[in-house]
Amino acid sequence: MNATIAEKILAKHAGLDHVKAGDIVIAKVDFAMVHDARAPNTIRMVDKMGVPRLPFASKTAWVLDHYSPPPNVEAAQTHSAMRRFADEHGSVLYDIGDGICHQVLPEGGHLTCGDLIVGTDTHSTTYGAFNAFGTGIEGTDVTAVMSTGKVWLRVPESVRVQLNGRLQPGVWAKDLTLYMLGRFGAEGLNYRAIEYVGPAVSAMEIDDRMTLANHAAELGAKAALLEADDKTFAWLAAHGAKAPQPVKADADAVYADRVEIDASALTPQVARRHAVDDIVAASEVVGQKINFALIGTCTNGRLDDIRQAAAILKGRRLAKGVRMIVTPASRQIYLAALREGLFEILIEAGASVEAAGCGTCVGITNHLIPGDREVVISSANRNFKGRLGNHDAEIWLGSAATVAASALTGFVTDPRTVAGGQWEASHV
């Protein structure tokens, strides 16, 4: 029927045989999420609508991650209201320190292949790593989802990205996503569904696949979807997900564009200050001094990211004057990193480790405020001016390996040029 992955999932959830790009559908939702930065709008809309029952509330997670821990009384009050709401309506609650919404949802077994997942965050595209249609909606829209179990969507055009070869040691999905931003520009694939396919995707472990789907938000994508394979099924089964219903595009599916990339030719990339799409090879800016390093966030706070940093910093110290914060994406990842001794390595190197959450990424909890003219290199997804609380500071983006290598030398550094920088996930 000439259908893409996105079209097949949305058609099924709308109860239709077929949909095409541009169609408006009313689709059944499998699971929904509200995080604390959007929760007040959701709760106000529930009160305003006076909805007596919220049948879908039990399939909605309330996640306390952006203001975690709360930096002020207002945030603390929001958290109290979220706890009360979840208790009254039977919703799932992930409290302070449990982790970032995009990590705890799949870890909690709340989604599987073929699902439609909505959340109050643009990086809800992350769920596409599991062959699900994940997309962001507003907090007020979640009220309608909890009331009806449905959401309206315009079916997006799809772009098929064929990733040939495989990423070389020291090069990660983060480098690929930065390359994509340099090629297409921020919002360059606005409201499109990206299908990532090819041998380079098959070679990736789940952590890297989640990065690939997550960072599509900076491209403006409505969703980013990967095909399912044995790695997908094994990960989902290990986390208690329901039986997968994998979806593949038809051989004659119609795409707005088809792109081919030789993943084996990619090198470590960085985004320069203030723009997520001002991309250069790390090797081109090796003289750029850095003062602060951040590893974490929903994009690169997973176990393999922490392993990358530990492989580089083991038995070493951060460069003089450089500070580093590591924020795992979830409590599960925090515990796994502890058990592997990764945090001991990083702390001995001079890093600090904080509880799982995303407050540092968005500058809400004020745990990382750079000084004037200081430079932060971060594995986060955005480097907008002032994002960390100081408009006179700079933020550069790179993989966890690039961040760790740069923290070691004090300058932006290609991780492949330092010992441990060519660590591979398959070595675990």
Image: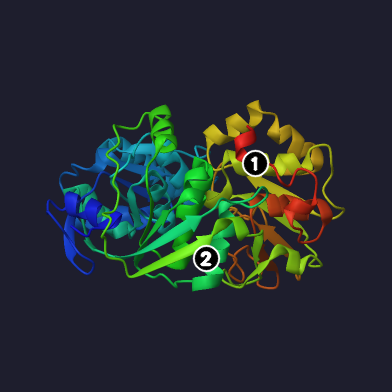
Residue 174, percent from left and from top: 57, 55
Residue 363, percent from left and from top: 59, 59
Under circle 2, the secondary element is helix
The amino acid sitting under disc 2 is Met
Q: Which mark is residue 424?
A: 1
Residue at image coords 38%, 40%: 83
Mark 2: give few (<14), some (14-19) or many (20+) Cα within 10 Å: many
**Does 395 sit left or right of 206 as displayed?**
right
**Does 19 sit left or right of 407 as displayed?**
left
Mark 1: give few (<14), some (14-19) or many (20+) Cα within 10 Å: some
Compute the Cα span from label 2 to label 1.
Answer: 22 Å
Residue 295, percent from left and from top: 65, 49
Q: Is residue 394 above or below residue 124?
A: below
Q: Nearer the viewer, residue 144 or 122?
A: 122
**Does 24 sit left or right of 397 as displayed?**
left
Q: Nearer the viewer, residue 385 or 402?
A: 402
On the rendered image, what quadrant is the N terminus found in?
bottom left
Residue 358 appears in the picture as rendered: no
**Does 251 sit left or right of 403 as displayed?**
left
Query: Which residue ends up furthest to the left in the rendered image?
Result: 16
Query: Which residue ends up furthest to the right in the rendered image?
Result: 320
Residue at image coords 66%, 58%: 268
| Colouring style | rainbow
Residue tagged 2: 180
Under circle 1, the secondary element is loop
Residue 417 appears in the picture as rendered: yes
Q: Reading the chain from its start, which is encountered first: label 2 or label 1?
A: 2
Residue 203, percent from left and from top: 52, 44
